[in-house]
Amino acid sequence: MVTTTRNASMLMIIAKPNCSASWRANKLVLLALAVPSLGIATGFAMLGAWPILPFAGLELLAVGSALYYVNWKLQYRHVITLSEDSVRIDKGFYAPRQSWQFPRQGTGLAIVPEQHPWDGPGLSLQRTGESVSVGEFLNRDDSLKLAELLRREIRTGSHGSHGKRAF
């Protein structure tokens, strides 16, 4: 998903993975699985098969952990801030974990064509000696949207495969 915010002197582009379900929806799914599972496990425990309770609990813990992990991974974002004189790229989950700042004049956009018709093009912002890939987790439509947004703001430096830059 690609969103933009523009004011008089700045353009902020936020790229994040598509999220099919919110954390609240994931908790409801976990609850829908937990009620019958624990109900059945309790019934068997009352009949004397008490060892089923820890296994039912471990099963729900595993499903809950997997849902949490996937939801956490979907919070990853690339925030590209284009001001009049600089380009700033922040990458992270809830707060920036990595940041780059390039001068606007010396920054170019490298576009690597997709290998398969379903893939999106590879995008990276470059300056002399440094390259930062952006939006590698986006689907094709969102990747093309990000490429178009960046093309309007930054000169396009290459259209070749990796390793073949045409600045």
Image: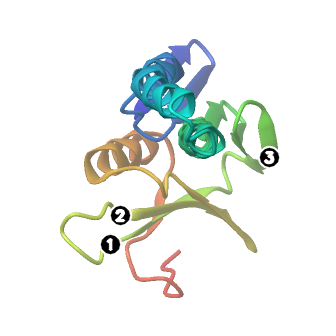
Q: Is residue 76 left or right of residue 86?
A: left
* Element carrying mark 1: loop
- The amino acid marked with disc number 1 is Pro
What's the distance in space between the residues labelled 1 and 3, CA to CA? 26 Å
Provide the secondary structure element on which disc 3 rests.
Answer: strand
Q: Position of residue 118 (x, y in %)?
A: 21, 63
- Horizontal placement of 159 versus 60: left or right? left
Disc 2 is placed on an element classified as loop
Residue 132 against residue 83 in the figure, above or below: below
**Mark 2 near mark 1, Cβ–Cβ under 8 Å?**
yes
* Residue bearing mark 3: 99
- Image point 75% across, 74% down: which residue? 129
**Residue 126 image point, x, y percent:** 63, 63
Q: The disc labelled 3 sits on which kind of residue?
A: Ser
Residue 128 in view here: no
User: Which of the colour schemes (rainbow, by chain, secondary structure, one colour) is used?
Assistant: rainbow
**N-terminal-most mark, 2 or 1:** 1
Q: Amino acid at mark 2?
A: Pro
Q: Residues within 10 Å of mark 2 (few under 14, many from 20)?
A: many
Whichever of callouts 1 and 3 sits on the residue coming sooner in the sequence is 3
Q: Is residue 148 above or below residue 164?
A: above
Residue at (51%, 81%) from the top-left corner? 165
Residue 145: mark in rendering: none
Left or right, 99 with respect to 137, comes to right
Name the residue carrying label 2. Answer: 121
Query: Which residue, given by chain and number where applicable, does mark 1 sit on?
Result: 113
**Cα distance, mark 3 to mark 2?**
22 Å
> Contact (CB < 8 A) between labels 3 and 2?
no
